[in-house]
Amino acid sequence: MRTRGLRDLWPLPGPSGIVGSMPTGRSWLAWDKAHLALSRMEVDAAEPSLSGALERTARLAVRMLQVDRVGVWLVDHAARQLSCIYQFDREPGAPKIRVLGEVDLAAYLAAMDEHRFIVADDARVHPFTRELREHYLEPLGITSMLDAPIFRGQELVGVVCHESRGARRSWSTDERYFAGSVGDVVALFMEQHARLALETDLRVKEAALQRAERLNGVARLAAGVAHDFNNLLTVVSSLAERGASTSPTADCRAAFQEIHDTSARAAQLAERLLRFGRGVPLSTRPSSPNAVVQGVLRLLRSVARGTTLRLDLQAEDSAVLVDAVQLEQVLVNLVTNAVEAGSKNVTVRTRRENGSVVLEVEDDGEGMSAEVQHQIFEPLFTTKESGTGLGLPTVVSLAESTGGRVTVQSAEGQGTTVRVYLRATA
């Protein structure tokens, strides 16, 4: 592999012809403006799409070089082949070849590694490109090529091909310089794109680490609260059991029994919070979402407090890897949020979707802004004066622990729909 030095930095032609050669065809000013436009191109950091930057460059190259197509190819040194990652063709619907692997590319790649550009007035007979004739040039009707290498440091990583159809043509010095500049700019694009991708990945990992740290803090808090809460529930459950056995009327006994049963559910939830805080894996015993909704319906209606609660349970004979108590926790959290959003109507749905069971809670409440939606899954974030900011993060944690996910669809004044996707087992 050669070392690229100052001799590779070809000078641009000047207006007086003292450096380089006198411009041909287009005016010196036109080439100067084109080089300036090329030097200002870059991958958009806001939308880091490599293809967008390549398209802008290819359109400029097609206009300045008057070629029919521009292609950007990457080299696979191990397989000794070229793969096209971008192609712009002036002729809509023109045939395309995306991989060159059946051709002996040794001479072509060696030339690319040694020269600023390959100038093939007649590519079908040129010693560096004639091997492409049968598998590439003739099928696509290409007669002339002006190709520039793409380097990453000292390594040849690709090539930019400027191609013409029809009668063979010659390439001016200005065109050669411009093609070489296009190759350099595409190399910069690839570096920019790789850097932006790394920065994006780093931001995602940093956000995930921060979220994990917050969840760890929430877990410790939950364990401490659950311990004290469990002690209080023991007293409530004991008094409710006594009231259920000693009350003089059936209505009172039924009310005390409901208090006792609800306390038992709360105690199970507290136990799971303790396990969560201690890092003990949550139970993944299968449960039926429809059965859970029906079983906790009386509690949900109590939570609704006058809000109309509707059921649309279509996930019959379906089971998920979340035990019943955890699923009850999800339902109560979501219905409570819907009621506290000022909803007049709340609908609980279940359905099958591909390999998942979807538990959906839809309301017609006040809805959420886009800004709020970006934060609702963050632990301790809440818009309520009496809120804890633990409801939705807990729902997400339960869903993700079994390979599921949670989505939210909402707009201010248009209500909210929360969908919990859980992996189905039956």
Image: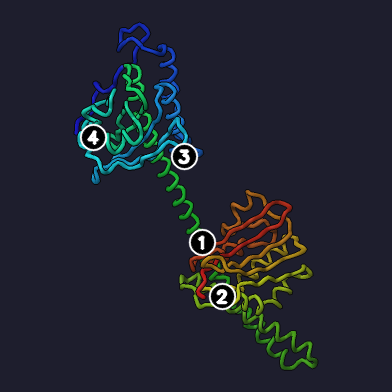
Q: Quadrant of residue 309?
A: bottom right
Counting residues from the N terminus, which is met first, the one under dot 1 or under dot 2? 1
Real-space Cα separation, disc 4 to disc 3, in angstroms: 36 Å
Residue 50 relative to residue 11: left or right: right
Q: Circle 4: is it few (<14), some (14-19), or many (20+) Cα within 10 Å?
A: many
Give the residue at x 67% y 56%.
383
Q: CA distance from mark 2 to mark 4?
A: 61 Å
Q: Residue 95: x and y, percent? A: 40, 38
Q: Secondary structure at mark 2?
A: loop
Residue 215 is marked as: 1
Q: Which mark is residue 131?
A: 4
| Comes first in the chain, label 3 or label 1 | 3
Kindly identify which residue carries mark 2. Answer: 318
- Residue 219 sits above or below residue 287 on the image: above
Mark found first going from the N terminus, 4 or 1? 4
Amino acid at dot 4: Glu
Identity, as a three-letter code, of the amino acid under mark 2 = Ser
Of residues 113 and 206, the one drawn nearer to the viewer in this rendering: 113
Q: Is residue 275 left or right of residue 385?
A: left
Q: Check disc 3 and report its element: helix, strand or loop.
A: loop
Alpha carbons under labels 2 and 3: distance apart: 42 Å
Q: Amino acid at mark 1?
A: Leu
Using the rendered view, name the quadrant where residue 420 is placed.
bottom right
Nearer the N terminus, badge 4 or badge 3? 3
Q: As shown in the figure, which amino acid type bears the numbered disc 3?
A: Pro
| Marks 3/1: CA–CA distance | 31 Å
Q: Nearer the viewer, mark 4 or mark 1?
A: 4
340 versus 425 height, above or below: above
Q: Residues within 10 Å of mark 1 (few under 14, many from 20)?
A: many
Image location (x, y in percent) of residue 379:
57, 59
